[in-house]
Image: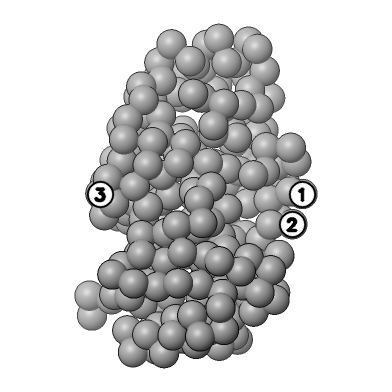
Amino acid sequence: MPNSNAILASLSPGDAASIRPHLKPVHLESKTVLFNPGDRIDAVWFPAGAVVSLVVGLATGEMVEGAMVGKDGVVGVAAALDSKVALTQAIVQLAGDAFVCDAATFKGVALQSERLLSLLFRHEQAVYAQAQQSTACMAAHDVQSRLCRWLLRARDLSGSDTLNFTQEFLAEMLGVRRSSVSVDAHTLQHAGFINYARGRIQIINLEGLREGACECYETVRSQYAHLLGETHV
């Protein structure tokens, strides 16, 4: 249902009536690349269970996550609205449902609604703020607190306490070595915060994980709440 995406659920009746006929439900598989840097955006995605990472690739082949978008947002909207190319890679982090809309069609609807444009601009501000916070987080906080923050954000956006991640993928997104993730995941498991086995993480102590997370988790939540209000998940 479109109501499972906060942006779609917040649309006015008129905007909803204009866009809903053009929404196509899809299931996004993990590791699916929605677009790469330099690609022209031909669709926008509204996650409704799937979680998408916006990542930056380096010449060495390494990838680092800048922001994470799930049922609180939309992927590809900025490039779609100005008809320009993507600047990051968008890769599906957690498999799940989404709604997709042709970019040109979505642009036509958005340009007819000042309220919808305002919402989209504020959403892009929130994503940008999240990317800035991620940069500060990588520079100032230890891997364990960043891992806690990352798991909490993924949980919020997926709506599930079970997260299917390999240590390799976690290391890529956090911009650290796999050995660092392995050590800290073991520490969190020993503390009773998570169970981890065969690429699946089960969060079993939510409050403990929150206590272990760096300040960036709550900062990003408050930024989304401030900019998007009731659309924030």
Which residue is drawn at the image coordinates 59% and 33% (left, top)?
7
Label 1 Cα neighbours within 10 Å, binned few <14 / some 14-19 / many ≥20: few
Is 22 placed above or below 103 here? above
Asked if marks 3 and 1 touch (Cβ < 8 Å), the reply is no
Label 3 Cα neighbours within 10 Å, binned few <14 / some 14-19 / many ≥20: some
State the residue position of label 1: 226
Q: Position of residue 189 (x, y in %)?
A: 49, 80
Q: Earlier in the sequence, mark 2 or mark 3?
A: 3
Q: CA distance from mark 1 to mark 2?
A: 6 Å
Asked if marks 1 and 2 touch (Cβ < 8 Å), the reply is yes
State the residue position of label 2: 222
Q: Assign a secondary structure to mark 1.
A: helix
The reply, left or right, for residue 155 in relation to residue 230 is left
Is 34 placed above or below 62 here? above
Q: CA distance from mark 2 to mark 3?
A: 29 Å
Q: Report the front residue among 43 and 32.
A: 32
The reply, left or right, for residue 16 in relation to residue 57 is right
- Find residue 120 and report its image quarter: top right
State the residue position of label 3: 32
Asked if marks 2 and 3 touch (Cβ < 8 Å), the reply is no
Q: Is residue 85 visible?
A: no
Q: Assign a secondary structure to mark 2.
A: helix
Amino acid type of the residue that numbered disc 2 sits on in the rendered structure = Ser
Q: Position of residue 186 (x, y in %)?
A: 44, 85
Amino acid type of the residue that numbered disc 3 sits on in the rendered structure = Thr
Q: Is residue 142 visible?
A: yes
Q: Assign a secondary structure to mark 3.
A: loop
The reply, left or right, for residue 207 in relation to residue 198 is right
Is 226 placed above or below 142 here? above
Label 2 Cα neighbours within 10 Å, binned few <14 / some 14-19 / many ≥20: some
